[in-house]
Amino acid sequence: MSDITKYAQDAITLLKKMISIPSFSREEKDVADVIELFIRSKGVETKRLLNNIYALNRHFDPIKPSIFLNSHHDTVKPATGYNTNPFVPTELDGKIIGLGSNDAGGPLVSLISTFLYFNDRTDLPFNLIISATAEEEISGSNGVELLLNDTAFIKELRGSTIIGALVGEPTKMQMAVAERGLLVIDAATHGKAGHAARGEGINALNIAVKDITEINSMVFDRVSPLTGKTTTNVTVIETENKAHNVVPSICHFVIDVRVNELYTFEEMLTTLRSKLTCDLNPRNSRLRSTMIPMNHPIVMAGKKLGLPHYGSPTTSDKALMYFPALKIGPGDSARSHTANEYIYPHEIEQGIAGYIELLEETKSFLLP
């Protein structure tokens, strides 16, 4: 049995334990416990911040730069339509089926195995940090962002600079070098309440429909060769009024804006405000578009290995990192958040092997 196969078997065992534990965002304590126990069972000292688990390689040298290995252990709620129990890891047709198996359990256990593979090595020109973090699915404030800004975590680095990251998400082990940003905007139109039968009032819904029609027709000229178009979509609409015979005075709706790297959030807001009559209140500006330089050592290593690269339409924790990050991992993004979510065991083995190859090749671009 090869070393990689043994690491893959351990990774799959851990993945099955993770699937069996509900770990919705903000409810990740139990799965974090399991991950922490697994890493410690391999003789690695772990640290913890809320539901975020992390560890430094055994021969961590503050003089060397560091590479951050990260993925998340929280999940969304199971989609309707599962043929199996989403919390029972089920092997069927060569697949491991279960909630979080693909997004992002497979990438996470593959990264943990990669860290363990390198843990005792002394020949690396960089340190490795493994982190299994929370609240990615809701872009929460108590996940990787909290960890990276934590005083205790920064102290653990002892001055070592994080020069890059591998962010574990299902990309079929292709390099997602860029991501569109996510700008969520709460919008509201204002009218005047009145009795529907008498035609009184000013219907806030009608005003909203005009704005939504405008939003749906918007075209943004700057098209990225990596991440494509910037898009705007209305995804939620509601009024506080539930009576059929009352004209609503206020209509709330939500605009989902996916911003490529050629626009800033500020530009988007300015454009929207110039064309719409509604009030616009962005929820936050944290999840901006990102791109790792194509001449970054990790990307250059991937290109040398023949890994294809692309721009991702989805947003990940990479958006919350203050250093260059490459999104890459086993599995397929198309399976995420779907019923009967799955990953193949061979994808996990290939993921571990791929991560190891990528880091081994990165050495050559960092050695003097």
Image (tube, rainbow, N blue to C red):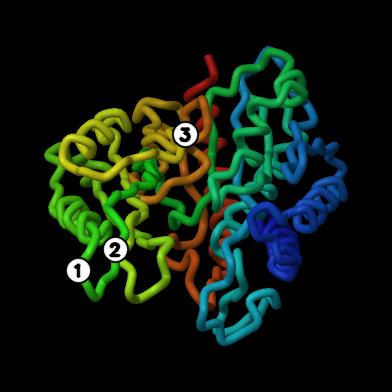
**What secondary structure is found at the residue carrying circle 1?**
loop
Residue 283, x across and y down, in percent: 45, 40
Front position among marks 3 and 2: 2
Q: Circle 3 is placed at which residue position?
A: 286
Q: Which residue is mark 1?
A: 199
How many labels, in total? Answer: 3
The reply to whether callout 3 and callout 2 are in contact (CB within 8 Å) is: no
Q: Amino acid at mark 3?
A: Arg
Give yes or no for contact between labels 3 and 1 (Cβ–Cβ under 8 Å). no
Q: Residue at x 73, y 26 (%)?
A: 153
- Residue at 51% x, 57% y is 330
Kind of residue sitting beneath label 1: Gly
Disc 3 from disc 1: Cα separation = 44 Å
Front label number (3 vs 1): 1
Q: Which residue is mark 2?
A: 194
Q: Is residue 348 left or right of residue 152?
A: left
Q: CA distance from mark 3 to mark 2?
A: 40 Å
Q: Secondary structure at mark 2?
A: strand
Q: Position of residue 154 (x, y in %)?
A: 70, 21
Q: Residue at x 64, y 80 (%)?
A: 91
Label 1 close to label 2 by CB (< 8 Å): yes
- Residue 308 visible in this rendered orientation of the protein: no
